[in-house]
Amino acid sequence: MLGLLIAVGRGTARWLARVGALARFAFEALASLPTLPGAGRRVAARVLLNQLRFTALQAVGLIVLLSGVLSYLTISATITQLSRVGASELIGELMVVVIVRELGPLLTALAVVSRSGTAITAELATNTVLGEVRALEGLGIDPYHYLVLPRLFGCVVSVSVLIVLFDVIAVFGGFLAAVAFGDMSGARYLGIVLSNLTTQDVVLTMVKGLVFGAVIGVIPSYEGLSVREGPTEIPQAVIRGTVGSIVVIFLFAALIVGALQ
Amino acid sequence: MTPPLLFENVPLGRIRRSTIGGPAHLPVDAEGAFSLEVQAHQTVVVLGDEASGVNLLGGLVLALDRVPEGRVLVLGTEVATLDRLAQLAFRRKLGYLPAGDGLLQNLSLRDNIRLPLRFGSDYRPKDIEGRVDVILAQLRLTRVADRRPAQTNAEERRRAALGRALAFDPDLVVLEEPFDGLTERAAAELLELARGGEVSEGGRRTVFVTGQDLPALLRRRVDRQVRIRRGRVDVPA
């Protein structure tokens, strides 16, 4: 019994230490922003543009596919049932509450974690193992400036933009499904959706974009730079970065919903 | 007059990493503390095996690692006591060639040499390009300048890493295991480039080299060799 308690205690202490180190890393990364030297801004901006290309631009196809298929499946499966009970007007609420407000941000974040979160951890872990990060510091270049901040802001901007794209495609996919499977005109469908869409939904979507993007920028970067044992630790770091990001994103999604109720 | 580099009673067995990223250090079987003075314009080589602590000395000079006691004075400054930003700025005054090169694999050799100048100086882009072209020519890298490190050989990578270290034309250069895997001729050439030519007192730059071995051809070209064992200076090698 005592052994079990000790094991649980040790595990909890390790977990808390990890959360503390992660929070410190995030704080230090943000605190380094004002100290980015003028000359370094141009270089960091170039890294940021590259990150946007990898994280946002190259993910457009995946987001369009996920969003289109999800909205098509949701609307085509529910519109017939709703029409039977004379509740086809609910399609707008369903679209806004389920897809635009909840699933859109969540699925977009998961897609970005699986593409870019894994890539960030693997890249930074490789940089670390090869001594590149230490060399940067030895040359007087802050790794927060050159490696972390461009990835953090790249992820925040990318996730926000991709969530908007996801929602637009979802509404359009629902439009096609409503016209194809329901007895609803396209104009009526759009009217219902738009009447259900409030300013709060738009604000909430933007907040989720910022929060989820920050999570994907920070956790994979932290895990990548935390590799100490060598190349064999890289896959473990990628797993820690991916799972950690997914868990924190779901927790934040639940917290945001809880805070609004 | 304070020497450009001074180690005073540094316990290498109690070293702690102070960088954001980097592999863990191998344990050092140390007894006692390390002390050494490097005079201006000298080329000093410290040799030792992996467990001796020799591979920790470069990191201590740049305050990439810290120790709880003793001190390391670099150009009269105890870098470890500066705040993080001041440490980063100070390191730009030094040249650093880390063990294993530390070249960024996703940048060409030219971009690797250009990076510290673009990030840490207010030089105009045109001046930076001119400086980079001169370094590439001096190091005979112009032909392969636009290749990435993985597309070049070990000698070219080492020369590019030296070019990056010399980007700011520093007075003090720290070289970690710079000759590993190089022919004696290539190693001698690398050392001459690091010294930056001759002045009446010795080399134009002060050069501090750490490693496990020194090619025979270079033994007569350095001003001082010391051997480190169990974290302290053993006997002159």
Image: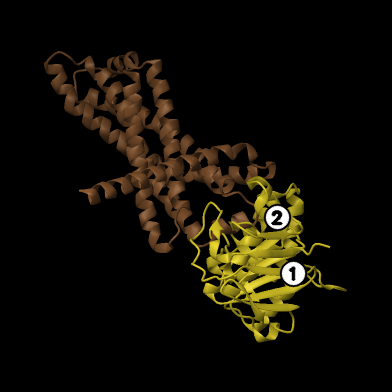
Colouring scheme, one of rainbow, by chain, secondary structure, one colour? by chain
Horizontal arrangement in the rendering, residue A69 relative to residue B100 (left or right): left
| Residue at x-position 38% and y-position 47% | A241
Residues behind callouts 2 and 1 on a single chain? yes
Q: Are marks 2 and 1 in contact (CB under 8 Å)?
A: no
Q: Colour of chain A?
A: brown
Q: Amino acid at mark 1?
A: Val
| Residue at x-position 68% and y-position 54% | B79
Chain of residue at mark 1: B
Horizontal arrangement in the rendering, residue A122 relative to residue A130 (left or right): left
The residue tagged 1 is B38
Q: Is residue A131 above or below residue A37?
A: below
| Residue at x-position 43% and y-position 54% | A122
Nearer-the-camera pick, A220 or A91: A220
Horizontal arrangement in the rendering, residue A90 relative to residue B104 (left or right): left
Q: Position of residue B135 (x, y in %)?
A: 73, 64
The residue tagged 2 is B78
**Chain drawn in yellow:** B
